[in-house]
Amino acid sequence: MKLNPQDWRKLRNPIIGLGVALILTVLLATFAEQYKSRAQQALQLQQNELGQARLRYQSSGLEKEIIVKYLPNYQRLIGDGFIGEERRLGWIDNLRTIHQENKLFDIKYSIASQEEYKPSFTLDPGPFSLRRSIMKLNLSMLHEGDLITLTEALKAKETTPFILRQCEITRSTTGAADKLAPNSLANCELDWLTILEPQAAGAASP
Amino acid sequence: MFDKIILCTASNKLIAGLWRLGKLQSHQVFQDNEQGLADFSLFLTNHSNIKLYFLVDAVEEDYRLQTLPHTSGGARREVVERKLNQIYRGTTYRAAHFINREKDKRKDDRFLFVALNSSDFIQGWINIIEEQQAPLTGVYLLPMISQSLVRRMKLMAPHILLSERLSSGLRQSYLHNGRLRISRLAPIPPAAQSQLGQFYVTETEKARLYLISQRFIGSDTLLSMVLPSLDESNKSICRDLEKEDGIECSSLDLAKFAQGLRLQPQLLQETPELLHMQLLAMGNVPDNLAPAYLIKHHQLNFIRQLINGATAAILLGGLVLAGIYLKQSFDDSAFTEQAKIATSEQNRLYSDVAKNFPTTTIPSNDLKLAVELRQAIADYAKTPKRMMQILSKALVAQPEIKINRMHWVLTNDVDPKDDDKTQSAIPLPKQAVNASNSPDFIPDPKILYEVAFINGEIQNFNGNYRAALESVNHFIDRLKADGSVVRITILQAPVNVSSYSTLDGSTTDERASQQSTALFKIRVRLKPEVSPV
């Protein structure tokens, strides 16, 4: 059947009506679908919140146990300087004490500025902000045992948590004419690690 | 939408009936004169946009049984159209009714070609329909409805001669296996009104002879005559027919049949064509004889109704869908409110319990995490002590080996490099020699390993490279013997005997007063001491 312009005029209104109905239906369905999605999301969020509230209440006994068990340790870590600002003067004092107590040769140190640290190995700081100061130690030694004495003593102080990342020990080439002269040299690098509480980290960040 | 107007022309008049949902609502008769045409025009004006079905009951009809090669789709339409043009050239109202396929030979298609030889007697009505642009669905021959009539009456005889008394006269239709083959209309002259029995006998004999002459039946074929009647009057005619023509004749109760079709039998008394119109209104629509231009308004109407129907369906579908979505939204909102109340209740219970907790500024899990983090860092904190002990143990048995430098690294690097600037030993080609306690060992990049780069030399070296190499190899074997060592890599050897590098020296090296040095460099990797948290 061939349609002439007159026929098309007869079909014009129904076709326009169909188009309008399509647009209206799409708009209506889209609006209703979005409304439904928002309601679903709100329900999902509320159910999650409810689940967390239930879990928190159910595990309140365990929570109390954890607080009782870990709060003293946590407060001690604050006191030690692991949590919060690092205590550089205390560390230098410790180093001097170790030097004097063990009659070591001169120890040169250098502490770089603190920076945020994201370790590449397994160490999850959770909500805390992990900070690192790179420390360099330069130590003249009578023998290699002096390095062990120093690192073990630093570790024994249990004040500044650090990870010794590298040590290069080289034999002195000047010879050992004097028995009390250094025979070798150690250059070490340490990561001095501290953490900041979440709210403190938020305030510290620019 | 549910209304239909069925028109039927019969002996200079037009019967128009209005059907709604298959039930006759009213009917009118228009005479074929100026007044009748004007009334019909008014009737159409009052019933605009209702589908029209035009039935024709007239003597100006033609039936031809034809076979055509079997085709389908467009090819069939083309073949049929060509045949129609061949048989009915210049005829406006014509159609081809497919009967069946022949069972033998080429299995050709069998068609009944039907036409109105003259259309002058309906042209007046058609002109009005065209003027009014009424939606005419088609023009149909009344005998074509007879097929539906026979089917509904459940008449199963193979050769049926259906004789119906209509306004135009006696219509006799021959049906073979329920399919129309031919039909004829014999007007009843006034003189025959008083001798209907004789008239029927004469016309039936004529019909039988015609059927024999056209080879529709043989002379010995048992013809079943069917006489529908509103009363008992046809029974005597039947007896006459059986007696005179020797054919089987049965009279059918038309009143009962009409009641079955929800049609009042008394209406058939005056207008017997209403029975055929009723069957047409009930959907028994035969092949259309009208050309396409006459039914264009109906087709346009049909398209318009389709579009309107689609519009309504889309709107309805959209509303239903939106309704379902909104219902789900309201349900979800109600559940959300319930969950809010329950959450508040849980929070209140927790607050009551938490009143007795020690005061802390951070959550309990974070307290635990901080303490465990401190321990994890402590676990990572290693010193070169273990490496030194392993080296010392190996060196005790080999005093000729002297360590000049040790670079100890705590790293998760899979292939750590040394930044040694003091080296003077002969570097090995790129493929450094590995010696390992665990051949399948692959370093875990998430774990810190102790790795040491050892620079050493053979003391009192006298130029015997073979002995120097053996000495270094023994040193490596002793290191390997320690369970803490996971891999040793020889980075530099006292002498490189590889065929891929140059080797310089002097045969008097061993006797030379100026002794050269035999330097070497190895990389030692230890297993993790404890698993980090």
Image (cartoon, coloured by chain):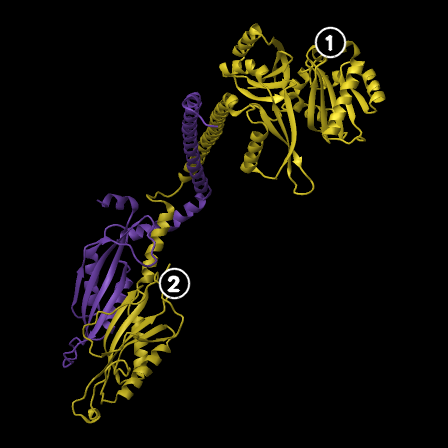
Chain colours: A purple, B yellow
Q: Is residue A56 above or below residue B331?
A: below
In the image, A71 versus B20, the foreground residue is: B20
* Tag 1: amino acid: Pro
Give the mark, 2 or 1, whose residue is nearer the N terminus: 1
Q: What residue is rendered at 82% in x and 20% in y?
A: B241
Question: Do we see residue B11 in this rendering?
Answer: yes
Q: Is residue B295 above or below residue B396?
A: above
Q: Chain of mark 1?
A: B
Q: What residue is rendered at 44% in x and 20% in y?
A: A10
Q: Position of residue B322 (x, y in %)?
A: 46, 28
- Which residue in the structure is indicated by mark 1? B190
Q: Position of residue B196 (x, y in %)?
A: 78, 13
Q: Residues within 10 Å of mark 2 (few under 14, many from 20)?
A: few
* Tag 2: amino acid: Ser
> Which corner quadrant holds the N terminus of chain B?
top right
Q: Position of residue B388 (x, y in %)?
A: 29, 74
The Cα atoms of the two marked residues, 2 and 1, are separated by 123 Å
Tell whether A122 sits left or right of B95: left
In the image, A101 versus A43, the foreground residue is: A43
Tell whether B479 sits left or right of B117: left
Question: Do we see residue B226 in this rendering?
Answer: no
- Which residue in the structure is indicated by mark 2? B531
Q: How many numbered badges does the structure rendering display?
A: 2
Q: Tag 2, which secondary structure?
A: loop
State whether discs 2 and 1 lie on one chain: yes
> Which corner quadrant holds the C terminus of chain B?
bottom left
Q: Which mark is residue B25?
A: none
